[in-house]
Image (spheres, rainbow, N blue to C red):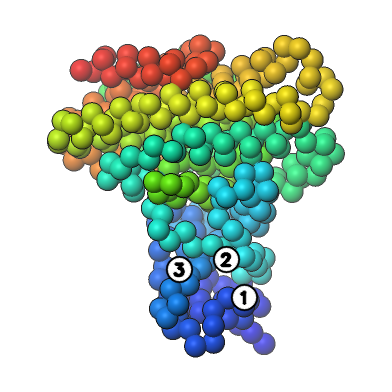
Amino acid sequence: MSKYQTYFLMKEPDIAGYIAEKLDYFPSDAKLVCREIGDGNLNYVFRLRDENSGKSVIIKQAGETLRISDEMSLSTDRGRIEAEVLRLQDKFAPGLVPEVYLYDGTMCALVMEDLEGYTMMRTALMEHEIFPLFADHISTFLVNTLLSTTDVVMCHKEKKELVKKFINPDLCEITEELVYSEPFMDYNNRNNVFLPIADFVEKELYNDTALHLEAAKCKFAFMNNAQSLIHGDLHTGSIFINKEHTYVFDPEFAFFAPMGYDIGNVLANLFFAWCNGDAEIVDAEKKQAFCSWILDSIERVVDLFIMKFKAAYPTMVTDPMAKVPGFMDWYLGTILEDTAAVAGLETIRRTVGMANVKDITSIADESKRARAEKILIILAKNYIMNRQSFVSGKDYRRAIQKAIAAFS
Ligand code: SR1
Ligand code: MG
């Protein structure tokens, strides 16, 4: 009996035999080398490469406990969700997600295309690289994957089948706690607050009850509005990029929720890169080029999303009531409101919550990091509290400039 017929957590030496058994991919004389390359919080990721031909695949296996903590267990069904969502997203946004070769429900392992020649976007942004086509690519991904899976476009029964298929309770619980709750009250003592701004966090986040109320409203909208099949964790660590192309991967948090969750995540994570560039780039010209490209990209993601959404809506919409004059603008308005709220929630949780981002934690100078974190918190509060007024890219640019000016 094959050793791969009962689940176990694979190590590097297990991978070549596993792929030989499961996939007809490498030639028989392949000189296979395997490396564990994962750096995420949850899973184990291996690259298996034939040194003769240069061909390679990625194997991602879900463990029963988190990679970052043995004490936190998590359903391995997230691997199935990820594989099925990648296949669906490839249908709606072809060429913007990696190809899935195999999903094995026994080993909870996903085998997929290796995006060699691409860099994880967060890593590239921390090296202050510029990607002029990113806003165009990601706005296409957002409109095509999100609008296609709404009730305004998809057959309602088909959509309900998908809602069933992508119920994702364990990963939703992580988001409900880490994004929508703990950053405001730290009731599980898991927040990571940068000590020099502890008083600021106390005042601006823990003691601001008006903010708590708005965050609570957003939390239950996230949990109760099954609007579209969202990626669910669309930060810059879920994107592989080069100058020509963008790939979105890692949709294990996917489920049906407000589409603004994905858009807001992209916007928030772009601004973390601005903070890093502002604090770390020494050369003034380079700093100006990188930071202004980030601001332009934030503005363009919003405006291109709106433009592409409005262009696609009349051609894609099927529900007769969704064609009623005025409905599209109202619906888009709710999406933009959710987007601003989530941009704020993601910003706050990555600054003071359990799962921080390297863009900020790697800022070496203590006072520069403190300044960045204060800008982030004030900006995020504006996004959440005034979410109805973020209706164009310019609104984001203005809010960012105001938050920066407050700490100059
Ligand atoms: C315990 S998991 C922490 C975070 O990592 C994932 O990438 C998600 O963003 C999650 O919130
Ligand atoms: Mg991830």
Local packing at callout 1 (Cα closer than 10 Å; few below 14, some 14-19, many 20+) is few
Percent x, y of residue 146: 64, 35
Q: Secondary structure at mark 3?
A: strand
Percent x, y of residue 219: 58, 27
Quadrant (top left/top right/bottom left/bottom right) for the N terminus: bottom right
Identify the amino acid type marked 1. Leu
Q: Is the C-beta separation of discs 1 and 2 under 8 Å?
A: yes
Residue picked out by circle 2: 111
Query: Which residue reaches farthest front?
Result: 244
Which residue is at 54% across, 13% downward? 388
Give whichever of 228, 297 is nearer the camera: 297
Q: Distance from label 1 to label 3 (Cα)?
A: 15 Å
Label at residue 23: 1
Closer to the N terminus: mark 1 or mark 2?
Answer: 1
Determine whether 267 is above or below 204 in the image.
Answer: below
Percent x, y of residue 331: 67, 19
Local packing at callout 3 (Cα closer than 10 Å; few below 14, some 14-19, many 20+) is many
Closer to the N terminus: mark 1 or mark 3?
Answer: 1
Give whichever of 158, 183 is nearer the camera: 158
Identify the amino acid type marked 3. Arg
Which residue is at 64% across, 39% downward? 145
Is the C-beta of the residue carrying label 3 under 8 Å from the nearest atom of ligand 2? no
Which residue is at 45% across, 26% downward? 300
- Tell whether 395 sits left or right of 252: left
Residue picked out by circle 3: 47
Which residue is at 48% across, 55% downward? 42
